[in-house]
Image: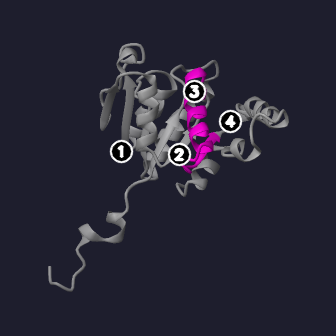
Amino acid sequence: MTPADPDPSTSARSLVRALVVCVFCGARDGADPRFVALARLAGDRLARAGATIVYGGGRVGMMGALADAALAAGGQVIGVIPGVLLDREMGHTELARLEVVADMQVRKQRMIELSDAFLTLPGGLGTLDELFEVLTLRQLGEHQLPILAVNDQGYFDTLAACLAEFVDHGLAGQRDVAALERFASLDAALLRLGLAT
């Protein structure tokens, strides 16, 4: 290589760090097969778009489907799981990295530290806990990262109505609840993150 030749290892593309997307979703399959299908699709699309995925580290339910699909597509996946859930959620051992942490609070903190954006898929209480953590931290000004929800077939409509009621009662600010951006499709959410595939 002559001095005039650009070094491919220092090209602009190679210097740009991959977007790290934290995905919140259920550790169960759910009653409708579309939930697991959506998790698989999210894992596949995020991996093919070049994003690194951070998630709860489990091998079961929607979490496992997400990670398996991302890995099958050649993606980088980082799991963060509390030791107490290592057996229950069957910590995924085929990830680029599986971090075992002390408890749920540390899990959330670590996932937030690693991430550039948050993508919420259907889930239960744990998913809502993670979602409200990042919404509250954004309200407090601790981050300005995008917080997205894939509102598959209206899954989050009831939550949106509940948040609107909080605002109507003067117990939450419109700007704070509007930080949760809902999208009717995964494709629309990925486009918002600049990850259209």
Amino acid type at circle 1 is: Gly
Whole-number angstrom distance, CA of label 4 to CA of label 3: 19 Å
Find out whether the residues at labels 2 and 3 contact each other: C-beta distance under 8 Å. Answer: no
Q: Is residue 130 inside the magenta stretch?
A: yes
First reached walking from the N terminus: tag 2 or tag 4? 2
Other residues around mark 3 within 10 Å, as few (<14) / some (14–19) / many (≥20): some
First reached walking from the N terminus: tag 2 or tag 3? 3
Other residues around mark 1 within 10 Å, as few (<14) / some (14–19) / many (≥20): few
Q: What element carries label 4?
A: helix
- Foreground label between 1 and 3: 3
Amino acid type at circle 2 is: Glu
x and y, in percent, of residue 69 in the image = 44, 36
Whole-number angstrom distance, CA of label 1 to CA of label 3: 29 Å
In the figure, residue 154 lies in which quadrant?
top right
The single residue placed furthest to the left in the displayed view is 1
At 45% from the left and 45% from the top, the residue drawn is 115
Q: Name the residue under label 3.
A: 129
Q: As displayed, is residue 82 above or below residue 167?
A: above
x and y, in percent, of residue 31 in the image = 63, 18
**Which of the labelled discs sits on residue 152, or is there none?**
4
Q: Mark 1 points at which residue?
A: 74
- Foreground label between 2 and 4: 2
First reached walking from the N terminus: tag 1 or tag 3? 1
Q: As displayed, is residue 87 above or below residue 128?
A: above
Amino acid type at circle 4 is: Asp
**Which of the labelled discs sits on residue 142, or is there none?**
2
Q: Give the range drawn in magenta.
A: 124-149
Q: 182 left or right of 43?
A: right
Residue 58 vs residue 38, the one in the foreground: 58
In the figure, residue 191 lies in which quadrant?
bottom right
Whole-number angstrom distance, CA of label 2 to CA of label 3: 17 Å
- Foreground label between 2 and 1: 2
